[in-house]
Amino acid sequence: MGADVVVIGAGPSGLAAAAMLAEAGRQVQVIARSHGFTHWAAGGIDVLGRLPAGDEAGAGEPVERPLEALGRLPDGHPYSLVGEGALLAGIGHVRALTDRAGIELVGDPAVNRSQITGIGTRRTTALLQTQSDGALAGRVAAIGFAGFEDFSSHLCADRLHRIGLDAVPIEIPLPQGFRGRHVNAVELARAFDGREFRGAVAGTLGRAAAGADVCVVPAVIGLANAAEAWADLQELAGLRVVEAALPPPSIPGLRLFDAWRERLSELGVGWRLGPPAIGAERDGDRVTAVLGEGASGPIRIPCDEVVLATGGVAGGGIETYRDGTLAETVLGLPIDGFAHRTEFLAADFFGSHRLAQAGVRVNRELRPVDRAGAPVLGNVRVIGTQLAGHDPTAEGSREGVGLATAARAAELLAGARARG
């Protein structure tokens, strides 16, 4: 088992890089300990919601036009390293992916928009699935499903009311077979894929929310057949329906993950999900094989190039130790960290934490570098939230940075093969 390129990590950046490399003719193998941030995120594409804390224009200044704001980012920020062209190429990739999968993405990376959440707040994003799009106006019904506890219609309606909307909470029963028990988001989404189930729900919904101008429902309206499920529900209920983002597992995020997984299968990309990458063999400054965990010992995956997309601290790509040191978990790359662990966290829980900015420093070719700026490994590219110099959560830049750096890595490696 071997590959031209081994991609380590199965979050948005790793999946996008694997697909783009395979589309460029590279033989790709993906290895990851589990799925990545798709299962946690709201299912849209966040490009840049706020400027980094400490920007000269003001700490955490909200961004309305992400592309215009890119020029205000510091030199070490991933967007500054790869440029607007890479971001647009990454957005183009995900649009082609979702079009192929029957998922409609609405929006524009040049202009931010709002996405409603399950607690009635609004979050900033650039592109989102059409089920989550649409203005809330007039009489709004927040619809909960009995037995599904990841969404409170009362909490949602209360927060919507606070921002000036005429919102009312309504809870409706689910069809027979779901009554009297708890149901999770994945089970409910799969049930909505069935026309009989959603027809029964639509009848109850139409009667309970009669007179409402729009219904806010939890984002569980279909998984494999989501576009049809959502369109059917609206038509059968006679109401406009907007999905609200929920806590994990994210059904809109799962839709994106499944679209990437299907595309990688079509492209013949190898896949090892579960046993993680645990190290590498080297020859001088080059990685010659990635080592994966196996039942009786390490599994060796020979390769020419490596794309590291294991995420930061939250993704398990970086470990923290009690003495304040940080370590990259697969290749032992240098981490841009801090002098002491007391510097990891900000005083404000919702602020920008320095720990979230920890990562691998790279040059403009996405090669890891040491503290003096010299490349460390000649055939490794680092992408996504593993990169130092940005806080993807505080900035609202996670998917955008992932797609931009994946596109740049794919461009560089495709060019390297062409020159070879």
Image (cartoon, rainbow, N blue to C red):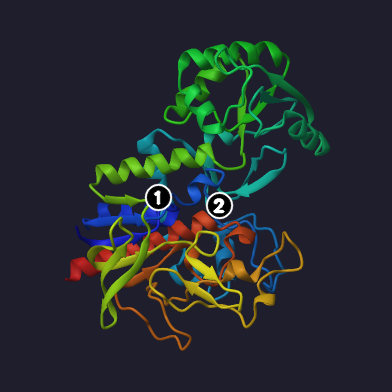
Dot 2 falls on a residue whose secondary structure is loop
The amino acid type, in three-letter code, at marker 1 is: Gly
Q: Residue at x 35, y 43 (%)?
A: 261
Dot 1 falls on a residue whose secondary structure is helix
Quarter holding the C terminus is: bottom left
> Which sits in the foreground, 52 or 249?
249
Within-10-Å neighbours for mark 1: few <14, some 14–19, many 20+ = few
The amino acid type, in three-letter code, at marker 2 is: Asp
Is the residue 417 above or below the residue 76 in the image? above
Residue labelled with disc 2: 46
Residue labelled with disc 1: 92
> Which sits in the foreground, 185 or 350?
185
In which image quadrant can residue 375 be found? bottom left
Q: Which mark's residue is nearer the viewer, 1 or 2?
A: 2
Q: Which residue is drawn at 46% across and 52% down?
A: 36
Question: Disc 1 or 2, which lies upstream in sequence?
Answer: 2
**Residue 272, image x and y in percent?**
31, 52
